[in-house]
Amino acid sequence: MTVAVEGGALGWVERVRRSSGPVRFDQYTRFTLYSFAASEAVLLTFWCVAQRGGLPLWAVLPLIALFAVHSVCHLLLCRAGLRYYLGSAGRPGGLTVVYVGLTVLGVAALHASIGAGVLDPGAVAASTWLLMFLAGPLLLTLSIRRSTLLTALAIAGSALSVAVLDLPAEQLGYHVGAAVFGAVFFGFSYRCSGWMLRVVRELEAARETQARLAVAEERLRFGRDLHDVLGRNLSVIALKSELAVQLAQRGSPSAVDQMTEVQRIARESQQEMREVVRGYREADLHTELVGARGVLRAAGIDCRIEDSGSGALAEPLQSALGWVVREGTTNVLRHADAGRCSVRLRTAGPVAELVMENDGAPGSGASTGGGSGLAGLRERLAALGGTLTGERRGDGTFRLTARIPTRPDRDGSGVGGEGGGEDGSGRGER
């Protein structure tokens, strides 16, 4: 039974809670609109129950059936209208016609029953509720002009019908005023909700495009640097090699000099290429912190950086911690459904500590994981006497902690000489 509950409603609620901000906003907005359709069904149900006390079943049962079909049609049109408004489906024209027809039929049936003396004049309230909800779904499937025209015609026809019934003017005023107010309120709510969902989707698409453009720009920069470094040298090598071949065919001893020059240029090109690649392989801590914040925010993840003295660290320590930031950011994007991420760097005392923490980590319990990226980082930090630990917590967060001594210990034991564990507390790697 427990498994079934976790996989049912509670499991869905948990998935929504752990999902990203745009997904949660989409789900919350949709179910807010669905709750409007449900509230109409609840109001009409209460009215039918109240009327049942003094009427025979044959008089109330047709209205109950009509209201039930109308409420279901309202909910279906709300779902289909949102898909159409967001551009993921076609216009639900047939369903729109059925919804308007059921609304008009319900209002006409109620007023006819009042005129025949089957229902008391208070039944006008039920027709008022039907008209109040009419404009909402229409504004998702039709233009504002057409929706307003249909709603106005329905309210005007209903007002004329109430006037023919010779009901008190106060009741007629209440009927028209409440219908107009409800049409404006629900129409605005439905239309504005659909518009906000569309804007959020466009922003999410823009973030994905921004991330792809950032990757493409980095590739172009890397290709441009390689071209600038190697393009000219490779052209010279090609020309001198061709010249050496021609000289060798003539038996000229100058061919050896040309090939010696080719060899020298090739070695210089190799060294220059290594310098270019080394610039990409060596991580600058400040640059990586700024880049991590930009990349994570572009992916819709709230990122906060606390840097208390990265500039005071030696270059090898900055490079090692920069690699931790880079790998940790990659893991957040690839393996976590995170909504927030924090990076804290403390350099007080003999140890520099970098802590990356994010929510949305899969699974629970303490574990460091078995990825090759973290294993490589441990080796890189171990060369400097540092440690790296990862811990998954029960609340769905993952914490990555890197510690590096700012100055080497005399016994060469690195961080936590007294604890003997990987993280300085005697626990070691889990």
Image (cartoon, rainbow, N blue to C red):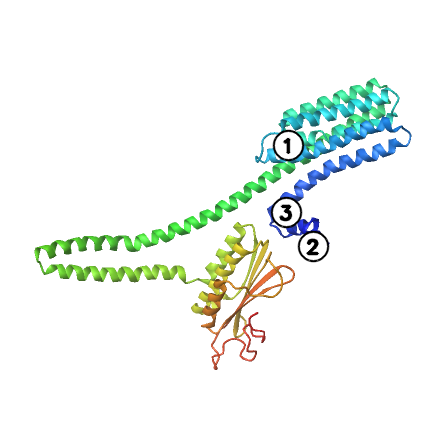
Q: Marks 1 and 3, Cα distance to the nearest angstrom?
A: 21 Å
Please tell me which of labels 3 and 2 falls first in the chain.
2
| Vertical side of 140 occupied by 104: above or below | above
**Coordinates of residue 349 in the picture (x, y in percent):** 54, 74
Say which residue appears at 40% left-offset and 51% top-offset. Answer: 219
Kind of residue at badge 3: Arg
Q: Viewed as shown, does residue 13 lie left or right of 169?
A: left
Q: Residue furthest front?
A: 1
Q: Quadrant of residue 173?
A: top right
Kind of residue at badge 1: Leu
Q: Quadrant of residue 278?
A: bottom left
| Vertical side of 353 occupied by 332: above or below | above
Kind of residue at badge 2: Val
**Coordinates of residue 425 in the picture (x, y in percent):** 59, 75
Say which residue appears at 82% left-offset and 21% top-offset. Answer: 112
- Label 1: few (<14), some (14–19) or many (≥20) C-alpha neighbours in 10 Å: many
**Coordinates of residue 313 in the picture (x, y in percent):** 47, 69
The residue indicated by pointer 3 is: 24
Q: Residue furthest top?
A: 164
Say which residue appears at 67% left-offset and 34% top-offset. Answer: 78
The answer, for residue 313, to whether it is visible in the render is no
- Label 2: few (<14), some (14–19) or many (≥20) C-alpha neighbours in 10 Å: few
Asked if marks 1 and 3 touch (Cβ < 8 Å), the reply is no
Q: Which mark is residue 140?
A: 1
The residue indicated by pointer 2 is: 3
